[in-house]
Amino acid sequence: MRNFFYKQWVKREIKRNVYVPFFQGIYNFEKRSIKGVEVLARKKVKGRYLSPAAFLSEIESSELMSEFTQSIIYQSLTLLNNINISNTLDISINVPPSLIEEQSFIQFIQTKVVGCYDADKFNLILELTESSRIANRTIFTKNIKLLQKHGLKFYIDDFGKDYCDFDTYFSDLKIKDIKIDRSIVNGSQNTLQAVINFADTLSADLIAEGVETREKSQELLKLGIKHHQGFLYSKPSVIEKVALSI
């Protein structure tokens, strides 16, 4: 009974838009321009915004990840549709692989997302996190290909941090965009070079996460990684602040 009431409470929080999108820029250091933004969820509590570390467990334990993710996507696109931009912008949003296997989530994308944003202004990208395994590769692959036909793109997020289904992502689905986890970016040079070498074999585009110093950005550029994300460039913030740099 306690779990039931807890779940209902979290569901009400989602409907009240207590969980809101923040945005962090992804930059092309070579061109000194913004490539896109990643949507990062926050929870608004008494005028403060909490990071996922403080609230994600309540979403997961309530088994409301799909409803939560749908809310963040919908809010993000509503906000972004109202800003003026001169160049096409990449909009990336984190999605656990398990949601790709849920038909209700796929239906949400097809009915509430596809056609509801300006495809001339935005490239919508779903970042597949490595933290969970694919339960049903057949359904997962079928749904990814369906969404690709609708114009959605995909990143492999936090690459190098956890488990990754290489065959499915890179062989079957031909995903070509990889976000390197901050622990790899700021860790061993040999490990980072191994990731770069792997990406080269796929002709994959790399984005380095957790870039916080000018020295690191210069080092990454010398290694051939021109797309960077991190506090050096911008912190996650509300859309009004991000719009000033677009």
Image (cartoon, rainbow, N blue to C red):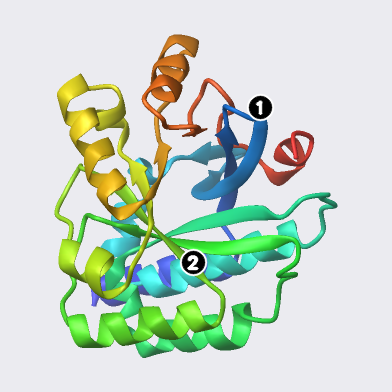
What secondary structure is marked by label 2?
strand
Mark 2 highlights which residue? Answer: 153
Q: Is residue 77 visible?
A: yes
Extreme top residue here? Answer: 215
Quadrant of the image for the N terminus? bottom left
| Dot placed on the residue nearer the N-terminal end, 2 or 1 | 1
Horizontal side of residue 134 vs 237, given as left or right: left
x and y percent of residue 227 in the render? 50, 36
Horizontal side of residue 214 vs 197, given as left or right: right
Q: Name the residue rendered at 33%, 68% in the picture.
A: 174
Residue 187 appears in which quarter of the rendering? top left
Mark 1 highlights which residue? Answer: 32
Q: Name the residue rendered at 24%, 55% in the picture.
A: 130
Residue toward you, 196 or 179: 196
Residue toward you, 240 or 221: 221
Q: Name the residue rendered at 82%, 59% in the picture.
A: 82
Quadrant of the image for the C terminus? top right
x and y percent of residue 57 in the render? 28, 54
Residue toward you, 29 or 128: 29
Q: Name the residue rendered at 34%, 75% in the picture.
A: 99
x and y percent of residue 118 in the render? 75, 70
Q: Amino acid at mark 2?
A: Lys
Horizontal side of residue 110 vs 64, given as left or right: right
Q: Mark 2 touching mark 1, by CB under 8 A? A: no
x and y percent of residue 237 in the render? 62, 37
